[in-house]
Image (tube, rainbow, N blue to C red):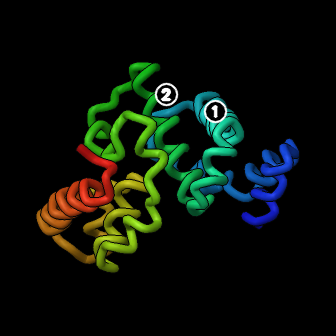
């Protein structure tokens, strides 16, 4: 389905937005449900994500990164910015934006970065930073202690910073 969406986007066919929404709506909602947003806010965020992807289609198509990961990254970014803008209670989410507030993080080939992580680190990365699961949820579902998950996440952030520095993306 991704190839069809991308081909339609290349030809500037607006039907690609409908296909994009049909294909990735559940992923977008899953991510948005982790934020303190009202139903109307979520609808607005979804529209903003679709618009942002459409406006960046030429840039995205050049980078050839996974469409699913790109949508997840944009959805998180839009939701975080929306929560900040609306000044909702936000403190638990601030530390989750490991991608930074700058748009340069949207250009990182996350698929390549994640492949440099161990399987366990990949699972933790996706659960915490893609799906915004709490440490409590992660520890319960993976059978780990709270402190163990916390320690793994700390080391994971350090490792990601190193990988990003080596790739020329960070500091």
- Name the residue located 36 percent from the left edge and 71 percent from the top edge: 123
Q: Residue furthest bottom?
A: 119
Q: Does residue 83 appear left or right of residue 124 in this picture?
A: right
Asked if one can make out residue 39 in the rendered structure from this viewpoint, the answer is no
Q: Position of residue 101 (x, y in %)?
A: 37, 34
Residue 12 lies, with reference to residue 116, above or below; the image says above
**Mark 2 secondary-structure assignment:** helix
- Name the residue located 35 percent from the left edge and 71 percent from the top edge: 122
Identify residue for label 1.
48
Q: Are marks 2 and 1 in contact (CB under 8 Å)?
A: yes
Q: Position of residue 96 (x, y in %)?
A: 31, 45
Q: Nearer the viewer, residue 61 or 50?
A: 61
Numbered mark located on residue 82 in the image: 2
Q: CA distance from mark 2 to mark 1?
A: 10 Å
Q: Nearer the viewer, residue 93 or 77?
A: 77
Residue 108 lies, with reference to residue 145, above or below; the image says above
């Amino acid at each position: 389905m991704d190839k069809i969406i991308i081909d339609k986007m290349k030809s500037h066919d607006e039907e690609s937005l409908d296909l994009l929404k049909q294909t990735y709506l559940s992923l977008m909602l899953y991510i948005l449900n982790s934020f303190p947003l009202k139903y109307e806010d979520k609808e607005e965020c979804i529209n903003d994500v679709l618009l942002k992807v459409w406006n960046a289609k030429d840039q995205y198509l050049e980078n050839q990164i996974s469409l699913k990961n790109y949508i997840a990254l944009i959805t998180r970014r839009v939701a975080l910015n929306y929560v900040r803008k609306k000044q909702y209670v936000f403190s638990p989410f601030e530390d989750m934006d490991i991608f930074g507030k700058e748009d340069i993080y949207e250009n990182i080939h996350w698929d390549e970065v994640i492949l440099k992580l161990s399987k366990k680190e990949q699972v933790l990365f996706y659960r915490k930073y893609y799906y915004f699961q709490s440490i409590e949820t992660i520890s319960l579902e993976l059978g780990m202690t709270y402190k163990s998950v916390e320690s793994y996440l700390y080391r994971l952030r350090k490792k990601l910073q190193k990988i990003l520095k080596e790739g020329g993306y960070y500091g």
